[in-house]
Image (cartoon, rainbow, N blue to C red):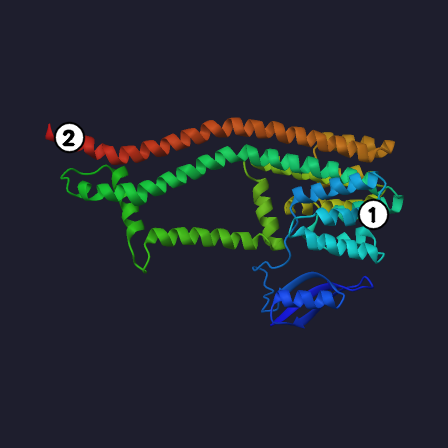
């Protein structure tokens, strides 16, 4: 068998080469006997490089990466050198995905590479803001301080995302229950009554006829499987295609633009993206990075592609000498109050602090709007669920009441 291995040499170099072996275990043992440090072994095979087929290393979960930085900051604060801190963390690392990455980072630091350059080489496996933050700390000699700033930034972002997801869980559960109930009644309950309804001499109500027609259509088997199964497969395929399309730049921007136009939720998503941008920029500026490169990194770190495309022209404007607040005001992306606060911060030399205040303001608005949306959605979903139940019950029992009336 042929494998592709990523190994570290005794000189500190990282190599990726093909090797022949009977199995992975034997190859690992052979490489270690030859003095290599094995980071990754994968079997060589056909690799497709298509836009709709995502392949590559998995992204490290944000919560595990947060714990990593908390431990690293604590060890650096205790006075341990960076290499010794990485050694201690590698001994206790249990995560199967993160351990080989940390081992490679340790070996490359031992060979003399900067920590910021190492993490920059991993691309999207880690937050885009992390490597520039480390670089600012290495330049200023305050690596532990900038890591703690990044910890505060990541903690606030994760907390905002957690609140957003938790606020939308209950409505999502209600929608899921409604869909399941409709499917159960259509595919299981209605067919039990169809024979009885057909034997009745009375004309069935239109709602019952519609439900029977939908149930009959779903049960037909024109191509080996029932129509209902084909419909479910079509929906699954549609979601899969949309998900793959969303990984393309054009698809991501189109979907994110549609998200921003959603009633109620769209404004929350916009405010969250702007808060993410402000907090990223404040973190980089507080670490001593100049405004233009900090802007480039902060814009690229915004999750919503549509908001990101609206912020990108500001980089060139600031590079040409236009004040930052004026560039934001011309873009029309930020609210007027936020522009005023940023203008004050830029004129007084405390732009990083003012950006943090703007981000906090956006976070408060996001939380307030989420509470309002949740308060509004809960009764609406209950009414929707009640209407669905009422329609299903009426379609089944109304013919029975009509038959009983004709008998009497």
Mark 1: few, some, or many residues within 10 Å (few <14, many ≥20)? some
User: For residue 29, which quarter of the picture?
Assistant: bottom right
User: For residue 77, which quarter of the picture?
Assistant: top right
Q: Is residue 292 left or right of residue 65?
A: right
Identify which residue is drawn at 18% across, 41% down: 196
Task: Name the spot of residue 370 as percent of width and height, x first.
Answer: 58, 30
Q: Is residue 99 visible?
A: yes
Q: Which residue is mark 2?
A: 404
Disc 2 versus disc 1: nearer the observer: 1
- Does label 2 or label 1 sit earlier along the sequence? 1
Task: Name the spot of residue 263 as percent of width and height, x first.
Answer: 54, 35
Q: Is residue 219 left or right of residue 271?
A: left
Above or below — where is 29 with respect to 406? below
Q: Are marks 2 and 1 in contact (CB under 8 Å)?
A: no
Please state, as top left, top right, bottom left or bottom right, where the C terminus lies in the image: top left
Foreground of the two, 251 or 104: 104
Q: Which residue is mark 1?
A: 82
Above or below — where is 288 with respect to 357? below
What SS does tag 1 mark?
A: helix
């Amino acid at each position: 068998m042929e494998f592709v291995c990523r190994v570290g040499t005794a000189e500190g170099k990282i190599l990726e080469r093909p090797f022949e072996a009977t199995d992975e275990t034997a190859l690992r043992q052979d490489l270690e006997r030859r003095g290599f440090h094995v980071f990754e072994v994968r079997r060589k095979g056909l690799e497709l490089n298509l836009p709709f087929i995502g392949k590559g290393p998995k992204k490290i979960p944000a919560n595990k990466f947060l714990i990593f930085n908390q431990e690293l900051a604590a060890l650096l604060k205790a006075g341990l050198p960076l290499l010794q801190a990485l050694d201690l963390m590698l001994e206790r690392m249990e995560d199967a995905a993160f351990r080989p990455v940390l081992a490679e980072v340790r070996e490359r630091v031992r060979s003399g590479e900067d920590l910021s350059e190492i993490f920059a080489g991993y691309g999207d496996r880690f937050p885009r803001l992390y490597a520039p933050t480390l670089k600012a700390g290495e330049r200023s000699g305050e690596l532990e301080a900038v890591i703690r700033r990044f910890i505060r930034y990541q903690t606030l972002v994760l907390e905002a995302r957690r609140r957003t997801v938790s606020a939308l869980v209950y409505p999502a559960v209600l929608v899921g229950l409604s869909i399941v109930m409709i499917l159960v009644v259509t595919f299981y309950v209605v067919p039990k009554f169809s024979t009885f309804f057909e034997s009745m001499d009375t004309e069935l109500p239109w709602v019952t006829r519609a439900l029977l027609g939908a149930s009959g259509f779903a049960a037909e088997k024109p191509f080996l499987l029932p129509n209902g199964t084909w419909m479910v497969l079509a929906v699954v395929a549609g979601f899969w295609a949309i998900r793959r399309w969303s990984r393309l730049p054009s698809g991501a921007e189109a979907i994110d633009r549609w998200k921003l136009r959603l009633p109620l939720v769209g404004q929350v998503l916009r405010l969250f993206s702007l808060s993410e941008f402000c907090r990223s920029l404040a973190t980089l500026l507080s670490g001593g990075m100049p405004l233009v490169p900090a802007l480039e990194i902060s814009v690229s770190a915004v999750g919503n592609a549509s908001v990101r495309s609206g912020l990108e022209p500001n980089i060139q404007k600031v590079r040409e000498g236009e004040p930052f607040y004026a560039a934001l005001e011309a873009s029309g992306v930020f609210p007027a109050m936020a522009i005023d606060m940023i203008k004050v911060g830029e004129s007084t030399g405390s732009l990083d602090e003012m950006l943090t205040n703007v981000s906090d303001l956006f976070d408060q608005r996001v939380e307030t709007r989420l509470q309002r949306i949740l308060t509004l959605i809960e009764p609406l979903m209950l009414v929707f669920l009640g209407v669905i139940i009422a329609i299903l019950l009426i379609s089944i029992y109304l013919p029975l009441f009509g038959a009983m009336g004709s008998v009497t």
